Amino acid sequence: MGYRVVDPETLETEPDRPCTMHRFSEPAGLSSMAVNRFGADPGEQLPLAYHYHDEQEEALYVVSGTLAVETPEGTYEVPTGGLFAVDPGSPQRAYNPADAEERVTVLAIGAPPVEGDVHAYDPEEDGGGDPGDGR
């Protein structure tokens, strides 16, 4: 058996990100999932840019504020306490709208934690095909 408590105040903020990001997986000893916490002020995007994953499923749980998630099907609004789930191969871009009244805090969980699994997605180049086809 193993148990760990991770104090977010002891974690370094990831550099060169458009919002604050704390990685929980390694300090928690997690190897089967990626767990990160994001905080974005109005107008800030959660890392990454518009993207999709080949294998990784993502779950974005909104701790506070309202998260906007742009997809090829439209933009979703996810309120405090809501969860936005993303299947592999499904492009999305999460952000806090510029006209938001407060910061948004999101707990992001991805599994499996695959390296090199993320790809940029350009909706201008999408001809309606599979996002994994390289367009």
Image: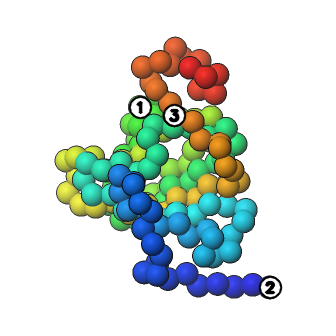
Residue most toward the front? Answer: 15
Mark 2 residue element: loop
Depth-wise, is mark 2 or mark 1 nearer the camera?
A: 2
Percent position (x, y) of residue 74? Answer: 41, 31
Residue position for label 1: 74
Residue position for label 3: 120
Question: Badge 3 local density, few (<14 within 10 Å), some, or many (20+)?
Answer: some
Separation of residues labelled 1 and 3 (CA atoms): 18 Å
Residue most toward the right? Answer: 1
Q: Does residue 2 appear left or right of residue 76 in this picture?
A: right
The residue sitting at 45% across, 24% down in the picture is 123
* Mark seen at residue 1: 2
Percent position (x, y) of residue 32? Answer: 73, 62
Q: Earlier in the sequence, mark 1 or mark 3?
A: 1
Q: Earlier in the sequence, mark 2 or mark 3?
A: 2
In the rendered image, the vertical position of residue 129 relative to residue 81, given as above or below: above
Q: Quadrant of residue 104?
A: bottom left
Can the viewer see residue 79? no
Q: Does residue 99 appear left or right of residue 57 in this picture?
A: left
